[in-house]
Amino acid sequence: MFPAAAQPARASAGDATLSRELAGIVGPANVLSRSAELLAYSADGLPTYRMLPRLVVFPTSRDELVAVVRALARAGVPFVPRGAGTGLSGGALGDPDTVVVALNRLTRILTIDPENRLAVVQPGAVNVHLSRAAARHGLHYAPDPSSQTACTIGGNVAENSGGPHCLKYGVTLNHIVALTVVLPDGELVQLGSADGECDGYDLLGAFIGSEGCFGIAVEITVRLVPLPPAVRTLLADFTSITDGAHAVSAIIARGLLPAAMEMMDGPTVRAVEASVYAAGYPADAEAVLLIELDGLEDGMDADVRVVESLCRDAGARSVRVAREEAERARLWQGRKKAFGAMGRVAPDLMVQDAVIPRTRLPDVLATIAGIADRHGIQVCNVFHAGDGNLHPNIGFDGRDPAQRERVERAMTEIMRACLDAGGSVTGEHGIGLDKLRYMPLAFDAASLDAMCRLRAVFDPAQRANPAKVVPVHSCREWRMAPAARSRAAGDDGLSPLTAPTA
Amino acid sequence: MTSLAAHHPATVAELGQIVAAAYASARPLRIVGSGTWLDAGRAVPPAERLTVAALSGVVDYVPGDLTITVRAGTSLAHVADVVARERQLLRLDPYGSANGTVGATVATASCGPLAHARGTPRDIVLGLQAVTGTGETIRAGGRVVKNVAGFDLTRLFTGSWGTLGVIAELSLRLHAMPEVDATWALRVPTAPDALRDALRALRAAPLAALALELVNAPLAHRLGLEAHPCVLVRCAGNADAVRAQRRTLAHMGALVDAPASVWSALRGVEPTAAWVLRLSARPSELARIWDAAHRALPAAGTAWCHAGVDLGVVRAIVPHAEADAAAALAAARNDAARDDPDAAVTAMIDVARRERAACIGERLPRRCWEHLGGGAMSHPLGARVRAAFDPRGILNPGILGTVSHHTAAFAEQHVGSRAGTQGGGFAPAAAEPTG
């Protein structure tokens, strides 16, 4: 699925009216409508999908955000919420019928309650800014996607983002306490609670990871976590990825729960070492394993010794313990910037995401290597080894249609291999547009229909990020009731279901 | 009155047929695991019993993955036995008998002291298979520990009390047993201000605790400890780390070793004939809520309370046998309560309101459920969720309180055209959109 090029935005009298109405709410400077301006919002972090939205609107306050959503509801116009646009599934894109509601001006950290370890933030607050603000209280926000210097908490909620340290600390779901949400029809609802337990259905849990299809979180209450008193970062290198995978299993089986366990394969190591992010990884290694232990100072060294010996037992050539913060940061930089470093390998990079049971790592990685060979492509593997979350990335030249087709076929086979191993087609990037086609491989018709029903609870008119996450044709109700469909589309005859030409 | 049918499906396919038939003829079903949570004391209408106990056993267990897939009727005790052989544990320790089923634990989102260390069904369940109110079998989530494929029906079904679907199978996250797993009892002051300071210090202390549970004097006594309020601390890690935590705690007050069995004793302490409710607020408010709850309760010695220190949740257990004493005591303070036999519970609910604490009923006298109010159906989206998965309201009717007939009536009118409605208006309880 490689859409050829961004489509031209449709300029019509309706657009001018809508644009004026939105400008009346947020001010003319906060509505973009010219193609040149819209271009910056035509893709997210997965640039293989491009489309120009109808308009982009930037609310600058909570009230403006609610007013914008209500105006869009009255006009029956579909919309896509967007944070920093660092998503990797083509989720935060709008087609020429759709308005992008950009949350980048709602960046405030509203309150921090250090004693209860809670913070309330606006959706556009940047992940790492929250951790920085919390640091003065000895706290941090634990989920740390690789894009954390740019990505927003609102986007993290939409995607249920993970990150290397989720092995120990859990994903976004485990760190969100309450949300104030504006539903697509403009109603404000409270999900979850920061003031004691919440009874009833877990709508907070259902909302997290809903990829912008259930509404927009206007205020987010997150749980903060104490900064660990002690941290040790280890780097082990292996002559085979299988040895590295065995080390991971041995560490988990011993009852240790490192904060993170990240593996990079040989091609990735070499790409990193050849880049400005060179971290001092042994360039001839076939796998490096980055392990971080954190917790109390007492007992830390004993755990480090155990991890070290388990790595050596599994065949590690060397195990290095970062002695100081600068060395630790350097080891991590190589991992966090690995995707960037791969930019050197080929003009285009398809960053992928899948999950397999941890014990299947060696054989699925071998299967992936076989698929890559068969299709004549190069796969670089970077992954959260501790929880089996793979990122098989493919470098290619997008200008060559034959290459694109080979990449496409290989990727489908890789996804099938992960599903066959009992895994999932995405661990943290989401479905968006990119993985829609894999959903029927992962779920049967009744299960997909159940997801559509849940979506309809939050967004009966299907105007919030339409046509993403669940393939439209799998929603039984929509197949069977064309009348309802046209009614839901509103008076101006716009269809919320206009499938992007992907 | 003719006796109602009882169903004991042995396979998921049979379960699907039973629910589909009930849906076709709008016959309500009461879902039964081991029979612990039939009605929570609520006024539920008569219904055919659907027992899932025969759907039991381990489907898949690969120890190296630290995950297990079991049928919903499997008991917690059985899972614990199976995984203990691999030195693993399921971090779900809800109150009540370990013969309770995994399915009921997840359906009711029940948890215990391990909730401190993310040991709640919400954190533990990776995926599930369920039969919805129309008899369709669906799967949500998966067997892997990280998964964001599609909308999160797993979280939605967890804690839905069977009202969205009958859970048939569950995949769960496991944890490796720590090298050392130690439990101590730390004596804490009784006076509210001193207790507040002690709890604050405890929350801020460098501990890697699996559980931090405050227990009142009668409960401590019942558990075989000194009859004085204490915090039960469960710490895990290697020997050095656990020793250091013990040192930290010893500086904070009188500390004694407690047997690991104190946790199973706590889980099993409440008699079946007891009313149970929970009061909660931000953890910093725990001492205030704790004190207020005790003032509402009958005289010391007749009711047990415990609380998750880091969660800020007080759980009060009022045995029925004490109901008369409770009523007399409350009446002495409040004339209006004189004729109310369930005065202790009513007084607790009132305390929660006055102290701006959240109040959740586990098992309450029937009229106290009405007094409590709230619940799933009071949320603007509650009735819509119900209607989406159980359009005829046949699954566990009444277990979440009211409006199931509204839901059913709505569904009859609107099923198949839900997408065409303008937002709210699903049921009288659902708020109209304000926009």
Image (tube, coloured by chain):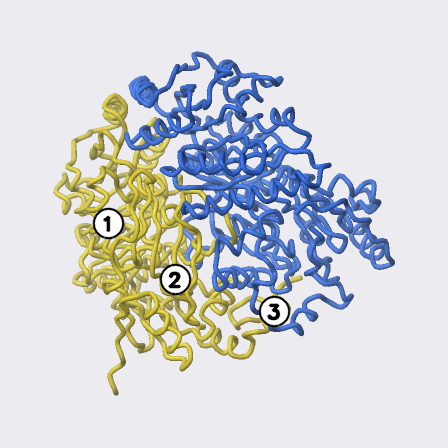
Chain colours: A blue, B yellow
Q: Which residue is mark 3?
A: A479
Q: What percent of the width, then of the height, locates residue A316?
A: 37, 19
Neighbourhood count class around disc 2 (C-alpha, 10 Å): few under 14, some 14–19, many 20 upward = many
- Badge 2 and badge 3 in a common chain: no
Tell me: B43 left or right of A287. left
Label whose residue precedes the other's in the sequence (2 or 1)? 1
**Separation of marks 1 and 3 at Cα, in angstroms:** 42 Å
Q: Which residue is mark 1?
A: B79
Q: Which residue is mark 2?
A: B130
For the point 46% across and 12% down, which residue is it? A324
Neighbourhood count class around disc 3 (C-alpha, 10 Å): few under 14, some 14–19, many 20 upward = few
Q: What percent of the width, then of the height, locates residue A327?
A: 49, 14
Quadrant in which residue A313 is drawn: top left
- Secondary structure of residue under mark 3: helix
Q: Which chain letter matches label 2?
A: B
Neighbourhood count class around disc 1 (C-alpha, 10 Å): few under 14, some 14–19, many 20 upward = many
Quadrant in which residue A274 is drawn: top right
Amino acid tagged 1: Val
